[in-house]
Image (cartoon, coloured by chain):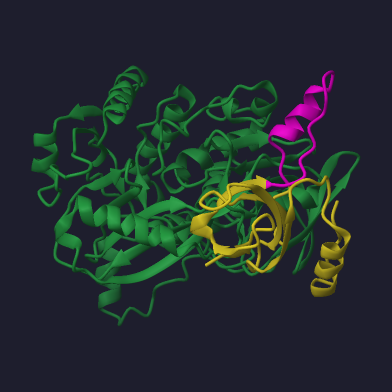
Amino acid sequence: MLTLTCPCCGVTVEETELAPGGEAHLKRFGPGSTDEEFETYMFARKNPKGVHFERWRHAYGCGKWFLTARCTATLEVFGSYPAQTTEPPAELIAKIKEKRPGWEGYK
Amino acid sequence: MRRYSIFAVAREALRYHAGWEKAWASPEPKKRYDVIVVGAGGHGLATAYYLGKVHGITNVAVIEKGWLGGGNTGRNTTIIRSNYLQDPSAAIYEKARSLYEGLSADLNYNVMFSPRGLLMLAQSEHEVRGYKRTVYANNLQGVETRWITPGEVKDLVPILNIEGPRYPVLGALYQERGGTARHDAVAWGYARKCSAMGMDIIQNCEVTGVRTARGKVVGVNTTKGEIDCSKLAMVVAGHSSVLAEMAGFRLPIESAALQAWVSEPIKPTIDVVVMANLVHGYMSQSDKGELVIGGGTDGFNNYTQRGSWHHVEQTTRALVETFPVISRLKMLRQWGGIVDMTGDRSPILSKTPVGGIYVNCGWGTGGFKAIPGSGYAMAELVAKDYSPLAADFGLDRFKEGRFIDESVAAGVAH
């Protein structure tokens, strides 16, 4: 069973208390963007077999969105961080690189 | 290849069954093939089979990282139906269902297709309206389905509790020609015929890279060395994004775990397939007597072939309420498969940004029923660059907003 820590209220909860929200850090382009950019934002997903940055909502708790780094091949959770950021925090990336030396990094 | 027949059984019975051949050869890869199909599951093998049978292309290799039919082909609940809402879906799923009818004779391999009938229960007013709409759509599409009353449902499935306190059965969408088939036999039957046509089925051979030159595919790197090809068909379901990444493009796919489980074997109690989409569960009985049960998909990306426990609990609880007679049964086995989900819950059969590479993926939670139709359309697409059955399932539909929305029509049980 997947357990995540909500960085907003600090509680560690299991997945039935959470709502998954898909890939994190998707970049939405402004007015005047091309069809390709909008299609990429809407549909193209990394869907990696390995380290995945994703959105979760503490639906049956504080109700806030937060972000998580998790390995889709092992279900290992590397850590959670607040959603008010455009990329993962450096210390989390360092922690993942330590555990997954072959990982190509966040891109 | 020697034909399987009653005479073959009689002949072998007289000589201690020592004369059976291997069903398919396991050769080492050649240097070059016209077409390489990645993925020896049902869809990949069917693609190869119809490439040979319909289009005469037999210089084909089917590459598989694990063993034949060991992915979702061996992990599904074997349901076959074609009662979809949209026209392109009805066309390809009905093609598949009709090919299943003659598949045992076509392959000379008993796939145990059992058109036992399939019910989709309506347990809310919304579902009643939705399924009646599907019946009307199906009748226009030439797919034989009809709406039946709670009384008829009870006659077909006596163990069903139609007066459930929370979710009474208000009727059902009934496809008499739907049913089940033996999942392994479908893969094995196709593999045997492909091998007989001279195709190479290469197991335990993982693709580690896709080689391209001037925007066109030239071959793949595998754990058994480099293999060249003119065309490459990616038919790898849950791992489609991983393979697409090797070729340098992204797909509108997310992979998640879907689970199924079976009960201990019991005497025949239910001779149709029942899907209860409102309460998230579906059930049929296998020839061994086990009740085969499936439920919901996890909402998060996952490649581990293990699903979340609460789906097992929710689905079993829903089915116990629907079929009170099963409440004392023990569950025997439980497993998960990685399904490739698209946003509109319709598959992708398409050319790709890389020349000579074709993808067949996105079947999500309902690929088994589509195997023959999917293979038929994919083979045509690979051979001729165009297939009328696959035309609406291209990758361009996402850019153009031309979705084939089955996420509402199909409900949870797909």
Q: Which quadrant of the figure contains the C terminus of chain B?
A: top left
Q: Residue at x 66, y 28 (%)?
A: B398
| B297 falls in the magenta region | no
In the picture, residue B176 is in which quadrant?
A: top left
Closer to the camera, B414 or A55? A55
Closer to the camera, A92 or B330? A92
Q: What's the magenta region?
A: A23-45
Relative height, residue B347 to residue B111 (above, below):
above
Q: Give the image location of residue B7, x and y in percent.
A: 26, 64
Relative height, residue B51 to residue B6 (above, below):
above
| A38 falls in the magenta region | yes
- Of all residues, the one furthest to the right in this rendering is B214
Q: Give the image location of residue B377, x and y in percent.
A: 54, 35
Q: Give the image location of residue A102, x and y in percent.
A: 84, 69
* Residue B237 visible in the shown view: no
Tell which chain the image draws in green: B
- Of all residues, the one furthest to the bottom in this rendering is B16
Q: Which residue is drawn at 80% across and 37% down?
A: A27
* Residue B114 visible in the shown view: yes
Q: Residue at x 43, y 51 (%)?
A: B296
Tell which chain the image draws in yellow: A
